[in-house]
Amino acid sequence: MQTTPYTGKLFLIVGPSGSGKGTAIVQLKKQHPDYIFPVSCTTRTPRPGEKEGEVYSYISKEQFREWIEEGRFLEYAQVHSDNYYGILRAPIEEALQAGKVVVREVDIQGFKSVISLLPREKVVGIFLLVKDPAELRVRILKRGALPEEEIVRRMESAQREVAQMELCDYRIESRFGEAMKVVEEIENIIEKEIVM
């Protein structure tokens, strides 16, 4: 049996746009400064209030494509329009080798990419499910003004993600106004998994 150099675990918070992944991550960061929260790279421009290195590292498309060629990403995708998003491989592998709890948000495609590159027993998928499509639409609209075709695209993307949620190890229903309950459920899963 092949042994892995990783003594830590990677927890991937999976779900469509508007499912509450970002909100959960913000709260987990406050409550667990000992966890590692790797920064994503993106080619999109920062939104108001976003700072370099907090959630995203903003790089050019040329740089991103270069790093794809060099195999530096654990997962990457072109999301919603023509912008790239991706997670660098090295910081996550280093944290897992150091025995850390690593927490990241991804979409289902990202999850599939990660589990194809890292030992499956070291990756835990937690899917956030919004059961009511009307509620998900409201959540997407709250994030800022978007053209109708973009909203439709995100809703269709959400349906595709939900259809594949069984790939994840856990599912948590994400209800409006219950963000702290979702965070508590994620914490319980992490606590259970790190002693396994």
Image: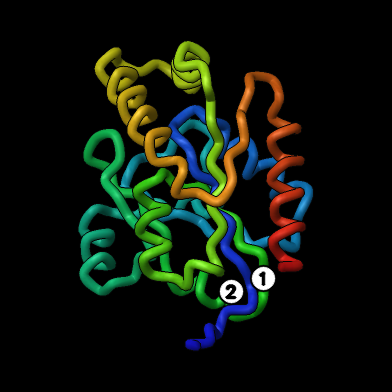
Judged from the image, the secondary structure of the residue bearing numbered disc 1 is loop
Name which residue type carries label 2. Answer: Leu
User: Which image quarter: residue 178?
Assistant: top right
Image side of residue 36 versus residue 104, left or right: right
Judged from the image, the secondary structure of the residue bearing numbered disc 2 is helix
- Residue hosting label 1: 100
Residue 132 location (% of width, % of height): 51, 16
Residue 112 location (% of width, % of height): 37, 55
Residue 113 location (% of width, % of height): 35, 59
Is residue 138 placed above or below 86 in the rendered structure? above
- Residue hosting label 2: 96
| Count of picture labels | 2
Image side of residue 184 versus residue 9, left or right: right
Q: Nearer the viewer, residue 43 or 128?
A: 128
Name which residue type carries label 1. Answer: Lys
Is residue 24 shown to the viewer in this render?
yes
